[in-house]
Image: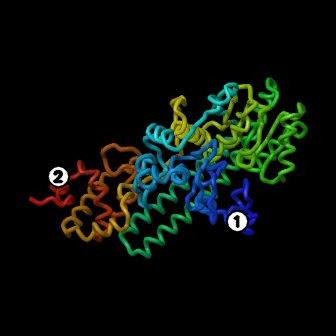
Amino acid sequence: IVNGTGLGEGVNIINYDVLRKYPVADLEWDVLVVDECHYIKNPKALRTKALTAIKARKRILLTGTPIVNRPVELFPIINFLHPEEFPTFFPYAKRYCAAVQTRWGWDFSGASNLGELQNRLRRTVMVRRLKKDVLTELPPKVRQIVEVPANGCTGAIEKEKATWAGIRERLADLRLAVELAKAKSEEEYLDAVNQLREGAQAAFEEFSQVRLETAMAKVPFVVDFLKEILESENKVVVFAHHHAVVDAIRSEFPDNSVVLTGRESQSIRQEAVDRFQADPGVNVFIGSITAAGVGITLTAASHVVFAELDWVPGNMSQAEDRCHRIGQMDSVFVQHVVLEDSIDARMARTLVSKQVVIDAAMDAEVEIKKIPVLPLPEIEECASVKRSRKEIQEEAVTLTPEQVAAVHTALRIVQGVCDKARERDGMGFNKFDVKIGHALAWEESLTPAQAAIGRRIVMKYKKQYSEELFRIIKGETE
């Protein structure tokens, strides 16, 4: 014991959950080894703050998935390892996260210059060893998206589509209110922002319930698919997200399956893994993506089926690797079973494309295949969305009455021919600007702040009104 702290002179092993209970940061250590270091991806998390406060002469951080979802998550790790090379976040984000400024501030969710990032990491802080390099006997993974016909599930899919369409419409109206509130008082603007946040949270919960209904409708197809696999293979691992889906699949394999979710105790979990690995009579492993996705070995199977998808691609990669580990002698085949024309069918392609981005950032020899991406429908954004309320208010005081009137005139001209087009066709507002363009055009008159919002929009449509009007809007003088 060191000074009554509970910390020993030799090797001290401690987990993330109790780290803050011990004065680890009060001492200076010879070596700090951090396993599964992707757990410190969030710089605001208490565990990250507690760990990065530890002083050590040498630091070694270990993980199989340093980037769980996007390059922004890597910065806390490499900043802790080499603060001289990666001292501040913003330059890193602009260079490698395709940073863009939105109405909420900066968006760092993208990816850019990944080849350069990879070379820089290898030159400074990263020793990357692929399984194929270290364990030559370990074969690669193959991923496949399996779209099954939606026979008998059309009702669930149509409900899913209708719900999503309704959510898009509601969120679009709430975002419109936020844009228009930029021209109002700070209190009104903050109220609109809070309503958007509450609406987004409600929409997420609503759509999560619909996704569960679709997943349950898909269970019979998943069960048939698993039975087909077992006709030619000894064992299979299936992952799901909801407990209800796990239970429904288990009910079809009552005597030859084991289950691992967050509901089971640690001893029961280990017993399930051991039975699957050693008992030839247990050939189906059913686990939840998060609870069964880390810390276990399932190499008795080389076939992985996802009955549901997780929003985070890193979670799915972790789950895949339960089979793709030391001792696996076969190529691991990963299949995502989705209903044709469902949101999951689009989502699967988006997730796989994100995994490609992660691989590109970390692995020099990775083969990147072009994947047809069908992203989830985006909420429509208008031309003014990248301008903050402060910028709108600052611009408003610079506009002359003549400019304000010119913006209103241009809005009405474009609105007069607008057919609420879903695509850009050179006539009226396109789909991104139609809501706010119409709202401003119908005002009896515009305030300078409203004109500042409308100005950014109508300048995109200068071909639909006179050059003279455009010059006034732009503020050009003779």
* Total residue callouts: 2
Q: Is residue 9 left or right of residue 64?
A: right
- Residue placed furthest toward the top: 232
User: At 49% from the left edge and 50% from the top edge, which residue is drawn?
Assistant: 109
User: At 57% from the left edge and 46% from the top edge, which residue is drawn?
Assistant: 69
Q: Which residue is mark 1?
A: 22
- The quadrant holding residue 157 is top right
Report the front residue among 259 and 55: 55
Residue type at the position of mark 1 = Tyr
**CA gap, disc 1 to disc 2?**
70 Å
Residue 353's spot in the image, x, y percent? 54, 38
- State yes or no: discs 1 and 2 in contact (Cβ < 8 Å): no
Residue 124's spot in the image, x, y percent? 49, 43
Say which quadrant the C terminus sits in.
bottom left
Within 10 Å of the Cα at label 2, are there few (<14), some (14-19), or many (20+) other Cα atoms?
few
Residue type at the position of mark 2 = Glu
Residue 123's spot in the image, x, y percent? 48, 39
Which numbered circle lies on residue 142? none
Q: Is residue 214 visible?
A: yes
Report the front residue among 183 and 239: 239
* SS at circle 2: helix
Q: Which residue is mark 2?
A: 467
Pair 1/2: label in front: 1
Report the front residue among 32 and 388: 32
Residue 351's spot in the image, x, y percent? 58, 41
Within 10 Å of the Cα at label 1, are there few (<14), some (14-19), or many (20+) other Cα atoms?
few
* SS at circle 1: loop
Q: Earlier in the sequence, mark 1 or mark 2?
A: 1
> Which colour style is shown?
rainbow
Q: Is residue 256 left or right of residue 292?
A: right
Q: Is residue 55 above or below residue 240?
A: below
Q: Is residue 349 visible?
A: no
